[in-house]
Image: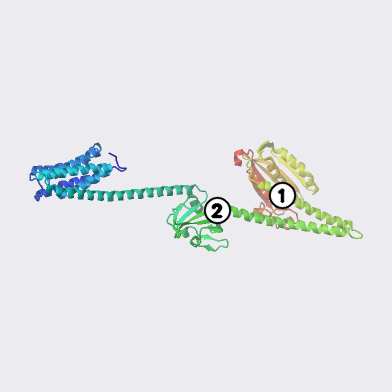
Amino acid sequence: MTQSPNPEINPRIIVASIAGMSLLLVFNFLTNQTFSDNPFLVLGTAFAILLFAGVHLLPSVRPHVSKAASLYAYHWILCFVLIFIVPTLSYFLYIWVLLIYLTYFSYKAKGVVYSAIALWAALVMGVQYQDNGLTVSSFSKIVPQYILLLIVSLVLTQLVFSNVRKRNDMETKVDQVERERKRLLGLINTMYDPVITTDGKGFILAYNAAALNLLDTHMTLTGKHIRNILKLKDAKGNNVDILHELEGTMNIQRRKDLVLPVGPADHISLDLSISTIMGASLFSKKEGYTLLLRDITKEKSLDEEKDLFISEVSHELRTPITIAEGELSMGMLLVDKPKPAMDEIKESVTKAHSQVVFLADMVNDLTALSRAERSDKKMEIQTFKVSDIIKDVEQLYTAQAAKKGLYFKTSVDPKIDTISTNKLYFKEIMQNFVTNAIKYTQQGGITVAVRTEGPDDIVVAVTDTGNGIAKSEQSKVFDKFWRSEDSLTRSTNGTGLGLFITAKLARHIHGELSLDSELKKGSTFSLKVPKILQNEDLK
């Protein structure tokens, strides 16, 4: 016999039917409706049936009883009852509907055939025994009952199993949908960008971990309204109704001008893409929305910084170019005079030359800035003597300081021998410090001192006796294009990039910059760097 895909029969159904049959036997006997009037036979059979039902529930017995054996036993019990205990054509006959159901449940069509054969045998033997022989009249009663019973059994069985199949199909589809939902959620969670899906009314259905990170929350978003989660503003600070944006999206919409406030004075710039989820029908309404968010705060900041940088460079270049062009034009006019004044021509050319030198310095500074802006993970680390770098700096700038009447002194702690870092960046930082010191010092001089600080670091300090920097301005000295408002400092040409570049280079070699300054007394710029910079530190 071929088993069905789901062969398990609920034992409670069987026990209830058997127990019910035994109780009906007792009731029929008490009301004189049984064929046999022998109390021992009737009541003994009822007791035996109850005992059989109780034993069937015992866990120690049930696993050892096969389905086939159980079904054979049920058929024999009912056959015995229909032949010897109750009238064969009584309502007990319709208990056979349950047997046909059970056999179909376990063995499909073959089980129904066997059960139908057993039913026919029970009817024939029962009528023959109870009517003392099988007549045409009794046979005519058996056939309609038999056909009716089979029809009722088959119809009910098909109805039951049709519903079972539909339920199983529905459960299969639900399982498939659930698996797809989990697969989709797994895919969404692997995405780097935040994703939120909502229903047609804006209530959140799903989201990924990146969305929680963006919103800086650990609470569950499912079931919450998108309006309460994404309180957005546009670039002008006006509130944006996100639900209105969703409802206004036909297919796909993208906005890059939105911000998400995250504090009293802070926000996240967002690139928001909205796509609608439509039903399968051509005229279906929107069933929901998918929101893809991307944090573009850094990109916006870089764009703004780039625009500001271009604006500032243009402004800084305009003045020297204008002055140089004006002085050269003046020199050309003076040359064309009948009696050129050489002193005036020389003065104009000198002024133009100074502006060209300034432009050359700015180009050099911009080149150095480009190098400093790079995150160079392959930066070369060299081991060298600090005293050699100090000697190079001393030879390079002593004459320049002497030309302004300034002294230039250097000192290196004898305990310091070699350090391991990027030699080019280290030397360029020192040169920027010294160049600045000479430029803004009118009398006195410059001192370069190198000392140890702790077991792992050295400090290079460049001290001048120049103009000094006001306390209110010291926090800005490493900003791009910053120039002091002090009149003495303003009188000296400068690009405002030197210390900004210095700060960039210092970060590359894990250096720390500091400033100690007082107006009219001078300044000390210091660089603290590790004696040994490891390659791992650059990653």
Q: In this rendering, is residue 95 above or below 62?
A: below
Q: Is residue 62 visible?
A: no
* The one of 91 and 131 positioned closer to us in this rendering: 131
Quadrant, the N terminus: top left
Q: Nearer the viewer, residue 31 or 482?
A: 31
Regarding mark 2 in the picture, which secondary structure is present there?
Answer: strand
Report how far apart the C-alphas of labels 1 and 2 lie in the structure: 33 Å
The amino acid type of the residue labelled 1 equals Asp
Residue situated in front as seen by the camera: 83 or 240: 83
Residue flagged by tag 2: what amino acid is it?
A: Asp
- Determine crowd level at label 1: few under 14, some 14-19, many 20+ residues with C-alpha closer than 10 A: some
Quadrant holding the C terminus: top right
**Residue position marked by numbered label 2 in the rendering:** 295
Q: Position of residue 277 (x, y in %)?
A: 47, 56
- Vertical side of 284 occupied by 160: above or below: above
> Is residue 47 toward the left or the right of residue 507 in the image?
left
Mark 1, residue position: 365
- Please tell me which residue is depicted at 75% across the width and 42% down the height of the picture: 394
> Residue 217 at what x, y percent from top left?
47, 53
Q: Secondary structure at mark 1?
A: helix
Percent position (x, y) of residue 180? 43, 48
